[in-house]
Each structure stands twice: as C-alpha cells, then as structure tokens.
Amino acid sequence: MTTIDEPGTSIALPAEPAYQDATRVFNLAAPARPAAALTARTVEEIRAALRYAESEGLPVRVHTTGHASAAVRPILDSLLIRTRLTGGVEIDAARRVARIPAGTCWGAVVEAACEHGLTAAHGSSATVGVVGYLLGGGMSFYGRKRGLAANSVRAIELVTADGEPRRVDASADPELFWALRGGGGGFGVVTAVELGLFPAAEVITGAAYWPAAHAGRLLSVWRRWTLDAPWDVTTSMRMMNLPRAPNVPPELAAGPTLCVDGAVLCEDGDLAGASSHAEDLLGPLRAVAEPVLDTWQTTTASAVLHAHMDPDQPMPVIGDHLLLGELGADGAAEFLRVLGEGSGSPLIAAGLRQLGGAYSVPPPDAGALGHFEARYSYAGSGVPMGGVTAEELRAHCEKVREALGPWDTGRTAPSFVEHFGQPQGHLTEEQVLAVDRVRARVDPGGLFRGDIAPNATALG
C-alpha cells in the first residue's frame, strides 16, 4: 500500500485489498480500474488524497456504491475516491431536515426518518447511495407530489479542487449550489448533504403482477388512468421476465408478467382520500384479471423501498433509458410489440415510470435540473446470464429505442442512464455553458473533469 505523508491516510494500488474495496461497483458490467484508489471516511482524508493526485498528475474520480458505473465515463488512469464518510444520519425533526454523510445508502435515511413520522424523496432501492442519486435529479415514488428529489436538497458540503471544504446553499455560493443539483458533476468531492423531509406516517404502497397475456388491456387501463391521475400517486408499469431464483416468488418466475407498483402519499393524514385514489388506480386493473401476486397495502413509509423489488446484490446489467412523451394507443402498441408476450425480449425488466404532476413544475429555487418535460421515463435492463449474451441485450435495447423513437423527447434523467455511450441530454445549451463557468471557477485545472456527464459540458 502506498502511504501519503499524513497519519491514517493511504492510497491503495491494484491487487491490494483496500483497492478492491474502494473500486467495488454494483453494476459488474462496468468495473472501475483506476491507477489508485482510496476509501475516504473523513474530510481530511479527502484533502490529503487531492494533494496526492496533484503531485502524481492524476485526475480524480468519485463514487460511492457504484450503481452508475456504466453510465459515467470509464474509470481508468485516475485516483478514485470512494466516499464513505463517518457520522451517521442526523435528523432534525423540528426543521424536517436530515444531514446525510456521503456514502450513506437510502435504507439508513428512510429508517431514521421513519422514527419521526417523516420520509424523503428517496430512490426505489435501499442500497442506492444518497448523494449520487440526488445530484442526478432523483426520481422517487413521491415525485408527482414532491417533484425531483434534488429540489429537496437544502445544503451541500464538499471539498473542491483547491482542497478547501465548503458548505453551499441558497445564500452561500448559490451559483455552485445551483450547478451541483443536476449540473452533471465535476465540481469536487461531496461529503454530505442536507435534505428536506416531509410527513408520511402512513403510505399505500406495493406491487401487483398479472400474467403477460393480459398486458394489452392492463396497459390501456393504466395509461388512461395516468392522463389525469392525482399528484399524490406515482406508479410504474413494467414487463417482467424474472428468472427462477431463491429471492423470486415462484408465481413470478412461471412466465412473463406485467407489474404495476408505486405509492400513494398520505402526507396530510387523509388516509380515506389516499385509499380512494389507490382504489381508482387498482380497482379497474384488478377487474381486468386477478393478479398472481398483489402486495399493495397501507403500511409505513419504509415499505416503499421494497415495492419495486430492485436487486440488492451486485450483478452485470445491460440496459437503456429514454424520456417519452404521451404514447397514445399507437405508442402502447409499439411498447408491447417489442417488450410484451411473444416479443422475444431478453430484458428482465422494461417499463414506464409515470411522470407529470410536480415532476413537470420547476420550483423557483431549482437547481440546474429542476423538472422533466415528459410523460414517462422508460427504462429496460437485462443480465447476460443463463444463455443470454450482452450482445443480444444491446441489440434488443436498440430495437426498443427504434420502436419508441417517435415518442422520444431527446431528454434523459441522469440517474436512469444505463450506459455512458447512450444518447444523453438533460441540460439546455445555455445551462451547459453556465455549469461550465462554475466548473472553471471551482476547478480551473480540470482535476475532476472525468466526472462530468457527457452531455453536461461544451469542453469535450
């Protein structure tokens, strides 16, 4: 192990155990292979690591859980800092704010907030890192009511290229605070965030699954419901081809299914109103056919983390993502043609996440990414296992992209991008120039240039 001239701070080289820990990723299809790596647990370790990078002429890359390793520029020939800051989640229940150290996953935040009858605009998996999700906008199952999760960020703590710790918010360097929230990265090493919370003593959440033979009628019913759905309900509709595995219920591995999952937020304590909204969604769907599995129920906010059944163990994932306009009957038919029963789709999951509502309304204090002008977020992914190859998955992703092309808005949600090479676009040309100006101020030497999303800079 190579040691920096500061007590307790070390840089690991390839083949060393600390290097393996620091470079672990969730998406095994895109491993990280930097020149050196560090798991940073304190701000001082980060500052020392930046001095080391400068002395060695290495650019700096940053990650936490590695969920987005395929979506970022390949991590090579650099110093990789894995942020795992100590301190734990701090909840200020009176102010409804959580302070969250970088490296914390959503499960810890949701559990801490639930003790106070609060929750956050979190992701659909307990194992996803909070910071990367928030800086990429963040789509939650409360999004149609609360908007993008980045809009709930109250302050960000980071270390910039000069090694100086900073805390930025709406009054302290508001320009950098704006750029950090959805600007595409490359500003420094985020060490903590302060995030606004909201009441959610109870929610209605879960997932219902039907045999794929009913997909045409179910998609039609769900799509019509989304046209004027209440803002306190956020759902997704997915075609599922789940394998037989210990963690997969046998009724879901018997054949392809269609799933509708999500959450109904009962923020103001009106459980009767929330129940009515849930019935307006689920009643017509259940009338089409009886689900083979139905977990929708009134429960605590922590259950929302498990409704989507995201995998909790690393695996190789190949996929694609689009933001779509209103599909209509023609778009729904194309979706089923390439993803429904008989399509030959090798994707394990492919579906539409409902947007609109507060997702479409940027608040006055929004960051660089504050809303989406789209009706649905499409995401599809598969695993090259069990006779399915990565080439077959990529080919089918292209087939889906072509089929849905007439409804493609040309925009993407950064936290849903599946691969660095896919078309991306979440900022306007004016915004790209603005975030580049911020980067030039806080990182004039381009130390963090490798962390910039491909569509978020005009500098190449």
Image: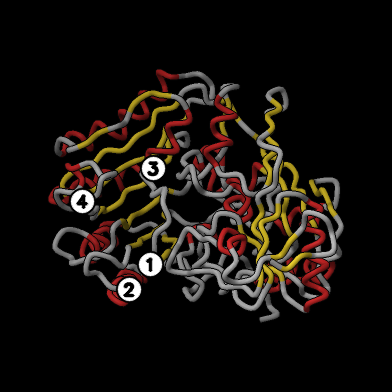
In the picture provided, is 307 more to the left or to the right than 116? left
Q: Residues within 10 Å of mark 1 (few under 14, many from 20)?
A: many
Question: Which of labels 1 and 3 is toward the front?
Answer: 1
Q: How crowded is mark 3: few (under 14 residues within 10 Å), some or many (20 or more)?
A: many
Label 1 with label 3: CB-CB less than 8 Å: no
Residue identifier under label 3: 235
Image position, residue 186 (x, y; %):
70, 66
Residue identifier under label 4: 244
Residue identifier under label 2: 390
Disc 4 from disc 1: Cα separation: 19 Å
Q: Which of 166 and 144 is in front in this view?
A: 166
Answer with mark 1 or mark 2, whichever residue precedes in sequence.
1
Label 2 with label 3: CB-CB less than 8 Å: no
Disc 3 from disc 4: Cα separation: 26 Å
Disc 1 from disc 3: Cα separation: 23 Å
Q: Residues within 10 Å of mark 4 (few under 14, many from 20)?
A: some
Q: Which amino acid does label 1 sit on?
A: Ile
Q: How crowded is mark 2: few (under 14 residues within 10 Å), some or many (20 or more)?
A: some
Question: Which of labels 3 and 4 is toward the front?
Answer: 4
- At mark 2, the secondary structure is helix
Question: Which of labels 2 and 3 is toward the front?
Answer: 2
Label 4 with label 2: CB-CB less than 8 Å: no
